[in-house]
């Protein structure tokens, strides 16, 4: 018997408009002199932020890379070992942050992540998406020690990335309904703290009163995505933030030659899965209209046929994830739910 459970959580989460000062402060507070910090930065558009952070205290080594492959992870691991690094500071998009997350997990040292876009809820999460050559895998990792979000950087990121972050967060609404369904029909256990955090993450953006893509809006988005990430750390899997709508997106990734951003796909699929289960979509649609989020697959060039193929393939993309697609599994049900895109 345990009196309580112990779950390691990230220690630092900061939202700022002064990147250099905030990172410097965090490092001075958390990692006093004597620590050796490796900076891993995106070598593309975000290189400029890496160059800024090169001068924060204790950065003893820096590399600039594209990131995202297992070779990149191994390269970072190699430097961590050979340079006796104590902390990794990662700055960039998902590819860099996931590279840092996995390399620091495999060497058991903490990481601090500075995202340059808010495109998904994987920043503070125990998962790294890495290209292993033959396939791209979601790999278990230790969640970062901390994350620092600079709203000035985020506001300069391409709109589609930030829209994707909104879609990924809204998709929690569908994922949570699938979790409840699995509890009801399959006896799956709901971890209430994870449930609650995921829900409040989605609500932070759905009910945000800030003007779309203003600083206040990005603050709500950053907090929501962080809450969603922590919900996955607490539950120990992606259940609180990934249901049928994520399975449809995984299937689209397999079918389409060039998939769209994850958050855009799951956000569009959420309308379908919510209609399929008979839940109201009006509030979500109103939010999508407000921020200019695509309201149908056709709007991003995905035909009805391709979308339906993805719905059919979806349950096979992940074993042991019971969703509404296991209950409403006839083409007639899907046909009816697809009407949500024409209203
Ligand atoms: Zn997601």
Image: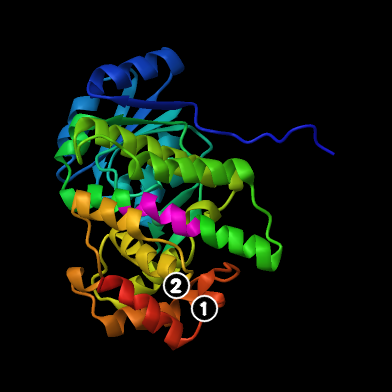
Relative to 317, is 47 on the left or the right? left
Q: Which residue is mark 1?
A: 328
Pick the front one: 338 or 304: 338
Dots 2, 1 in contact, CB < 8 A: yes
Q: Secondary structure at mark 2?
A: helix
Residue 268 belongs to magenta span? no
- Between discs 2 and 1, the one toward the N terminus: 2
**Image position of 154 with respect to 299: above or below:** above
Pick the front one: 117 or 196: 196
Q: Is residue 310 visible?
A: yes
Q: Which residue is mark 2?
A: 276
Q: Residue furthest right?
A: 1
Location of ligand 1 given as a quarter of the image: bottom left
Pick the front one: 78 or 9: 9
Instruction: Specify start and end residues of the magenta stretch as a single range.
Output: 167-175
Image coordinates of residue 268 in percent, x first then y, are: 31, 64
**Image position of 106 with respect to 9: above or below:** below
Relative to 271, is 175 on the left or the right? right
Query: Which part of the image, by quadrant, shows the C terminus?
Result: bottom left
State the image quarter where residue 201 is shown.
Answer: top left
**Image position of 337 with respect to 221: above or below:** below
Alpha carbon separation for disc pair 2 and 1: 7 Å
Pick the front one: 236 or 112: 236
Q: Residues within 10 Å of mark 1 (few under 14, many from 20)?
A: some
């Amino acid at each position: 018997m345990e009196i309580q459970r112990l779950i390691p959580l990230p220690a630092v989460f900061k939202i700022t408009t002064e990147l250099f000062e905030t990172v410097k402060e965090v490092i001075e507070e958390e990692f006093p002199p004597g620590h050796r910090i490796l900076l891993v930065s995106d070598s593309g558009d975000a290189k400029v932020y890496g160059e800024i952070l090169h001068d924060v205290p204790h950065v003893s080594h820096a590399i600039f890379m594209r990131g995202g492959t297992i070779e990149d992870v191994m390269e970072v691991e190699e430097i961590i070992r050979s340079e006796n690094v104590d902390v990794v500071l990662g700055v960039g998009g998902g590819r860099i942050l996931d590279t840092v997350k996995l390399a620091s997990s495999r060497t058991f040292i903490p990481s601090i992540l500075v995202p340059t876009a808010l495109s998904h809820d994987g920043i503070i999460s125990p998962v790294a998406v890495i290209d292993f050559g033959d396939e791209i895998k979601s790999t278990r990792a230790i969640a970062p020690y901390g994350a620092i979000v600079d709203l000035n950087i985020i506001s300069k990121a391409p709109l589609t990335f930030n829209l994707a972050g909104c879609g990924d967060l809204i998709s929690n609404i569908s994922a949570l309904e699938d979790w409840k369904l699995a509890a009801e029909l399959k006896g799956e256990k709901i971890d209430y703290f994870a449930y609650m955090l995921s829900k409040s993450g989605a609500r932070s953006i759905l009910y945000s009163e800030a003007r779309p893509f203003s600083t206040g809006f990005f603050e709500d988005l950053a907090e929501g995505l962080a809450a969603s990430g922590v919900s996955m750390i607490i539950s120990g899997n992606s259940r609180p933030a990934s249901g049928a709508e994520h399975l449809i997106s995984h299937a689209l990734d397999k079918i389409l030659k060039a998939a769209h951003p994850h958050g855009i796909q799951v956000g569009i699929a959420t309308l379908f899965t919510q209609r399929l289960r008979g839940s109201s979509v009006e509030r979500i649609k109103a939010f999508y209209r407000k921020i200019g989020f695509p309201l149908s697959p056709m709007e991003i060039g995905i035909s009805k046929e391709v979308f339906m193929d993805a719905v059919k393939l979806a349950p096979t993309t992940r074993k042991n994830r019971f969703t509404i697609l296991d209950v409403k599994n006839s083409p007639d049900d899907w046909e009816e739910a697809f009407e949500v895109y024409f209203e």
